[in-house]
Amino acid sequence: MPELPEVETIRIGLAKLLPGLVIQDVQHDWQKSFPNAPADAVRFMMKASVKAVHRRAKVLIIDLSSKYSLVIHLKMTGQLVYVGKKRFGAGHPNKSLAGDLPDKSTRVTVDFTDGSKLFFNDQRKFGWMRLMPKIDVTEIDIFRKVGTEPLEDDFTVERFIERLSRRERSNIKSVLLDQTIIAGVGNIYADESLWGAKIHPSTLVGDIPKAKMVALYSSLRDVLNLSIEKGGSTDRNYVDSEGKPGSYLSFANVFRKNGQPCPRCGTTIEKIKVAGRGTHICPHCQKEPK
């Protein structure tokens, strides 16, 4: 599943392409991929223009002039491919990004009046696109449960510490991965930010000094911003908004670097298990709590 930087990279690409386009038609082939079609789609999508493209956590939101929104979760194998004067693909890197569309993985096709199209492809059919009133978007289950956005301007260090402190008897890695605490942070970015702050991932939140929490706040935001700048990670199956693999993992300091020297101190990086996840650390920079 994509993490925050991968989905944000997709949002940036679509935000350059879709606003202003007017929807002419929509087709779908799988009820669970577009559950409230076709009646609502015909009524609230036809002749509506795209107003904006947003992201919340790992979900994309396309606002329409009809005061409805398309809410899209790519899950494991979803893709969004725009075909117009130029072609832009994002998501699972199979041949559908560059091949003729629609194909057997295409679940929803949105036709625009200028002749361009947006394809939602999903091989495994776990992803979904929903059309709903814009005013109701924040009330769907996934948004009611998800935590705060770590890159928003109002996400201050004080707010960061307050949210993490709700789980002070849990290890810091599990708390960073808890989507109800902070939205969009996954395994890669948890490992990288903890290395940056010199915190062992099994350390209990309540045992981390404030100075280290401040360092973790800065490290997490730096890591996420760097990954967005590099187009996301190449972890498994995500490419950027132009169909090019993200380059962040080539700049990672510890993730999947086990057996290699720590770029800060030269100690061999190790892979351990914390919070049920494979976890990469420098045993010298990130001392295990006693």
Image: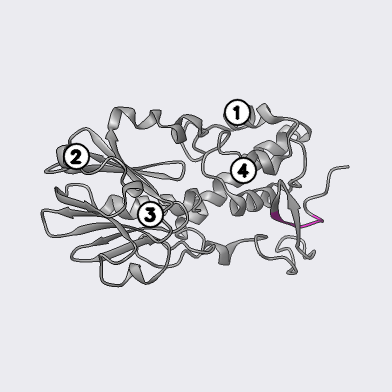
User: Which residues fall within the magenta stretch?
Assistant: 278-284
Q: What's the distance in space between the residues labelled 2 and 1, CA to CA?
A: 47 Å
Q: Nearer the viewer, mark 2 or mark 4?
A: 2
| Mark nearer the N terminus (2 vs 4) | 2
In x, y percent, where is residue 222? 56, 49
Local packing at callout 2 (Cα closer than 10 Å; few below 14, some 14-19, many 20+) is few
Q: What's the distance in space between the residues labelled 4 and 3, CA to CA?
A: 21 Å
Mark 2 and mark 3 in contact (Cβ < 8 Å)? no
Local packing at callout 1 (Cα closer than 10 Å; few below 14, some 14-19, many 20+) is few
Q: Nearer the viewer, mark 1 or mark 4?
A: 4
Q: Residue at x 47, y 60 (%)?
A: 230
Q: Which residue is mark 4?
A: 177
| Mark identifier at residue 10 | 3
| Mark nearer the N terminus (2 vs 1) | 2
In x, y percent, where is residue 59? 41, 44
| Mark identifier at residue 9 | none
Q: What's the distance in space between the residues labelled 3 and 2, CA to CA?
A: 28 Å
In x, y percent, where is residue 167? 69, 30
Q: Quadrant of the C terminus?
A: top right
Q: Which residue is mark 1?
A: 158
What's the amino acid at mark 1? Glu
Q: What's the distance in space between the residues labelled 1 and 4, CA to CA?
A: 19 Å
Q: Is residue 26 above or below residue 259?
A: above
Q: Which residue is mark 2?
A: 39
What's the amino acid at mark 2? Ala
